[in-house]
Image (spheres, coloured by chain):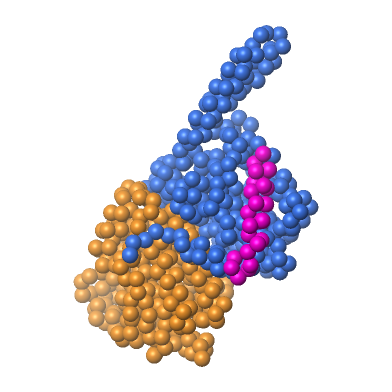
Chain colours: A orange, B blue
Amino acid sequence: MAWFKRSKENISPESQKRDIPDGQWIKCDSCSEIIHKKQLELSNWVCPKCDFHFRIGSEEYIKTLLDDGSFKEMDKKMKSGDPLEFEDTKKYAARIESTMSKTNLNDAVKTGTGKINGAKVSFACMDFKFIGGSMGSVVGEKIARAIDKAYSSKMPMIIISQSGGARMMEGAFSLMQMAKTSSRLARLAEAKIPYISILADPTTGGTTASYAMLGDVIIAEPKALIGFAGPRVIKQTIGKDLPEGFQRSEFLLEHGFVDMIVQRKDLKETVSKMIGYMTN
Amino acid sequence: MAKNILEFEKPIIELENKIEEMRKYEDNLDIKEEITLLEDKVTKLKENIYDNLTRWQRVQLARHPERPFTLDYLYLMTNDFVELHGDRYYRDDNAIVGGFAMLEDQKVMIIGHQKGRDTKSNLFRNFGMPNPEGYRKALRLMKLAEKFNRPVITLLDTPGAYPGLEAEQNGQAEAIARNLFEMSRLQVPIVVVIIGEGASGGALGIGVGDRILMLENTWYSVISPESCSSILWRSWDYKEQAAESLRLTAKDLLEQKIIDRIVAEPLGGAHKNHIKIAETLKEILLEELKELTKIKPDKLVQNRLEKFGSMGVYVE
Ligand SMILES: [Zn+2]
């Protein structure tokens, strides 16, 4: 759990590369192709040459998945209460403040309602750039409320996960968000309301071990890292290098833990089709 | 057994040894009064030390190799325990044990993490770190308890779910998530007790219930102080500070309203008196079950949903 490696100001070289840089020309991490930003946007932030799926945020996923202008955000202003007055090399409260101003987000998830080809859905999308997409009280509460909205309005629940796991700086409160969100999903399931879980790169730790793995249908983006423990920790445990492709979407498909791997350009149509099969 | 003495236990043990030594001469020399004085001194010293333990020191107590583990509690608190094995999909996991038992006159299902006490038993128990099959066995036993309307008691004591290759391949995350999902709707009472280490999702994977209790010298958090130190401080050397920052003791969690009750341990910790702590816990469990079994299943499940729903601190 909470195996995300870096907070905002000390992001690892790898994740830095993968966030969309400013500038007009962007180099693909995978094949080094130089791509114009506009072109990338038109191709859903997927490299036209090698199919590499760039890591994108909630704003981009809203554009990718929801009908234009249909998204109505809920609990937009909710932010962390720093219940432990946590301090490591830096105060958590200060970390939150600086991340908020850098990312223009209030925490690591955006929730609301929207439409997918006209069908109303309750929607949640995480943001990896906000403290590694970590799940603390705000993420847990906002997702729980989004599930409640799906429950009370009888509309499908869609969650896009990209997260390093539970947020260490809120201690046991973060851990309990796993139980909070899972129990809400259990009630939703009893009411026979569909839940589609979409996994983006990376989905690990407590996020995977709660709502991410509980979809009626689980869809993964190509080559996303998906697991419980992080690769570094597993490598330490077994004292060996990990096999090629370990904990990637294709590996999970092979072992039976996701239903399908879907290209970002096909995501909306696939979700829409699944909603059609699971609702009247 | 000297290897199992913690740093802060040393002055107490030295004094106790001294008293022991003096007792040998008690009959020949007139030192009764002196012994009584020393005994008072040791009691005061203990109270002083154990009331002022740092969070890291509590973590050390929680990991004490002589603390009672799940099977110890089963033997000391219950009768007619019948251990049940296997997840029915893959294999049996020795890091989680469970089965039916009699708690006084009550038929219950008890499930818990199981650590070993020496190298050999620790290897057999995988240091109390379950694989997915452990969580799936636990769930199977809980569903069995539900089917025959028996309350469930879970005892948590793990350094974490096992971060291994096979564990990932077999869906560690799915197994834990499934348990949270199913436990939240289980139609029988669940009492959860942290008896040692409550490390993260590996602990919570059998930790959703109606009443959450912690033994006095245990910890429960999202991550261990060592791992937290290595990630946030980028060094293993800040575990004491990490323990302080995480606020992970029983007292902390009661203040955070994440647990309902603290179970007092014998002075010096549960490892000092297995029989006593087992008696205390048994009494408390009976008390909790008496209340919980009065509640109708629908209400029980609703309360459980609200209980976990209320956890978290945010600003709107
Ligand atoms: Zn490329």
Q: Where is residue A102 in the image (x, y as percent from the top left)?
A: 25, 63
Single out the residue that lies furthest toward the right. B80
Q: Residue at x 52, y 34 (%)?
A: B50
Front position in the image: B68 or A219: B68
| Residue B302 placement: quadrant | bottom right
Tell me if B314 is positioned left or right of B167 in this view: left
Span highlighted in magenta in the image: B276-300
Q: Which residue is drawn at 38% across and 80% down?
A: A113
Q: Is A153 rendered above or below residue B90?
A: below
Q: Residue at x 69, y 12 (%)?
A: B25
Is A69 a magenta residue? Answer: no
Q: Position of residue B188 (x, y in %)?
A: 65, 65
Q: Which residue is drawn at 65% across and 20% down?
A: B20
Tell me if B81 is positioned left or right of B59 in this view: right
Q: Is residue B146 visible?
A: yes
Q: Position of residue B35 (x, y in %)?
A: 62, 16
